[in-house]
């Protein structure tokens, strides 16, 4: 059984974690698990068919459990139109392989859901990473079937709104360990750290 506690990290040596890398940097190591994708902050405006072919090739690797990090950001990166086109291409790969998508979402929750619907890919599971939105945003994403992954900083109302069976935790690129994140989230939910880790381990949408 694959056990994932940290649903999103950029630490290349992380264990029991989903390590996010660009397809161009994918170099799988024994016993580790990955998501592969082109980050919306980076060169999504220069991607071509060869880049997406590489994405699909890497995504088929047995140690790749998810696609991403991909998504949209109103505050950084290429235009929203270009970010959206790249997001849909990632969704298409995810759909073909029945894998979830680790999704970067900064003030674009409705945009992402609309694009997924218009592309006919509403069955693709989204893991909203680094969830910091408010309770309303959380409910919108949850109603669309998303999983919400919380890091060291989060909106308490959004966290307590999230059903335990849709909850994940992560370190992303921060200095906190996953146990530090787990402790903060567990305290906010009145759970023990052990209970929380057991919960998120069961939740990863494989």
Image: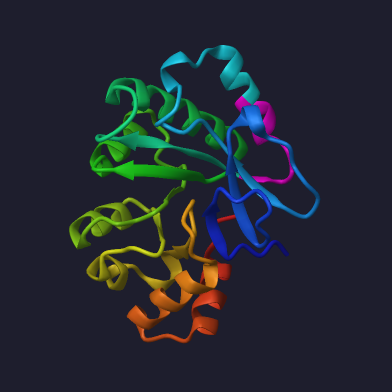
Q: Where is residue 56 shown, x and y percent of the image?
A: 63, 27
Outermost residue toward the right?
30
104 in relation to 202, above or below: above
Total marks shown come to 0
Q: Seen in the image, is 101 located left or right of residue 58?
A: left
Q: Nearer the viewer, residue 178 or 4?
A: 178
Outermost residue toward the left?
136
Residue at 32%, 57% (x, y): give it.
142
Residue 206 lies in quadrant: bottom right
Residue 134 lies in quadrant: bottom left
Q: Where is residue 161 shown, x and y percent of the image?
A: 27, 69
Q: Which residues are magenta?
A: 55-65
Q: Where is residue 59 shown, x and y percent of the image?
A: 65, 35
Q: Seen in the image, is 166 located left or right of residue 48?
A: left
Residue at 26%, 70% (x, y): give it.
156
177 in relation to 27, above or below: below
Residue at 49%, 16% (x, y): give it.
47
Q: Is 63 within the magenta?
A: yes
Residue at 78%, 55% (x, y): give it.
31
Q: Where is residue 111 shown, x and y percent of the image?
A: 26, 36
**Looking at the figure, which quarter contains the N terminus?**
bottom right
Q: Nearer the viewer, residue 179 or 60?
A: 179
Q: Is 151 within the magenta?
A: no
């Amino acid at each position: 059984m694959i056990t994932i506690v940290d649903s999103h990290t950029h630490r290349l040596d992380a264990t029991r974690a989903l390590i996010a890398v660009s397809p161009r940097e994918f170099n799988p190591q024994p016993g580790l698990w990955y998501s592969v994708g082109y980050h919306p902050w980076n060169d999504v405006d220069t991607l071509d068919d060869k880049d997406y072919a590489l994405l699909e090739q890497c995504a088929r690797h047995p140690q790749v459990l998810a696609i991403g990090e991909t998504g949209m950001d109103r505050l950084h990166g290429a235009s929203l139109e270009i970010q959206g086109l790249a997001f849909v291409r990632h969704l298409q790969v995810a759909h073909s392989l029945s894998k979830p998508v680790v999704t970067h979402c900064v003030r674009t929750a409705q945009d992402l859901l609309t694009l997924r619907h218009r592309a006919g890919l509403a069955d693709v599971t989204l893991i909203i990473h680094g969830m910091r939105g408010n309770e309303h945003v959380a409910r919108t994403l949850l109603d669309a079937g998303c999983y919400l992954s919380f890091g060291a900083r989060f909106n308490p109302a959004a966290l307590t709104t999230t059903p335990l069976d849709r909850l994940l935790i992560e370190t992303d690129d921060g200095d906190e360990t996953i146990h530090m994140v787990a402790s903060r989230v567990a305290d906010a939910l009145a759970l023990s750290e052990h209970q929380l880790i057991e919960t998120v381990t069961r939740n990863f949408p494989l």
